[in-house]
Amino acid sequence: MHTRTRHRSSRPSRLVRDRIDSVPTWVLLIQLFIGLGWLRAGVEKVISTEWRSGVELDRFLVEHGDVTVWWYRPFVDLAVEPSLVAVSAVVMLGQLAIGTALIVGRGVGPALAVGMLLNLHFVAAGAVDPSVFYLLAQGAVALWLVESSARRRTSILAAGTTVGAAALAVVSVSGISNLHPAEVVDDPALMLSMVGVLAALAGVDSLRRRGTARRSGQRPASTAFATGSYSRSTRSRPVNVSASITR
């Protein structure tokens, strides 16, 4: 009886320990920080009757109408404004789901993809801060996931994302309206162009690294994290990196 009780009581601590040990420290910190941010935003909308009724979203669109990126305006007019309540619900539920996934460490890849997509919508609509910083943080974790995977379809996904990021940078350039150093961070088009360029460069470099590793018969250096075979106890011992990669 006591053994069974002790086993049950140790289960939560084991889950927490497994969560902590499953990824590098920097990845864990970003996931928790961004996850809590998404969860906070979702809860804020749950308790706001104006958000759930679509009133707050409508106010947001009106206030940011002058800075909405030109190519995003038709989407706002045709898809968002006629469906304010539905869009408000999707954003609210999406934020709650993203935050939960990032905190518990389950479904992190899809959560990052949906999170970055939402942030792109927010920035294109005119709300640069804090979405652009969320984009960079989530992009860093997503890049780590790509470089941790040896699957061929990951390379295809990375290539598609790289092309999409480059296209985002190109189409947003023409919408840049402010180059003043004190105000440039508030220009949605410029921020999207910068994010697109950075993402495209990161994607090209990641594909180059994967190609080099594949030709030499190596695995990605961080595959141990992705497969769950990593534990923090291995950090305390010196590791022959070149040997561990080629196993």
Image (cartoon, rainbow, N blue to C red):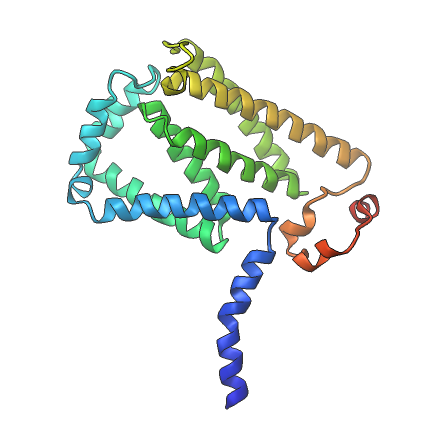
Q: Is residue 91 visible?
A: yes
Above-or-below relation of 82 to 88: above
Q: Quadrant of residue 72 in the image? A: top left
Residue drawn at point x = 35 percent, y = 16 percent: 71
Residue drawn at point x = 68 percent, y = 43 percent: 150
Q: Percent from the top left, x then y, of residue 148?
A: 65, 43
Residue drawn at point x = 38 percent, y = 34 percent: 118
Q: Percent from the top left, x then y, of residue 111?
A: 45, 44
Q: Is residue 231 visible?
A: no
34 relative position to 55: left or right: right
Residue drawn at point x = 69 percent, y = 51 percent: 224
Of residues 80 and 69, which is closer to you in this image? 69
190 relative position to 151: left or right: left
- Farthest residue toward the bottom? 1
129 relative position to 24: left or right: left
Q: Percent from the top left, x then y, of residue 200?
A: 57, 23
Q: Quadrant of residue 41 in the image? A: top left
Q: Percent from the top left, x then y, of residue 198?
A: 55, 23
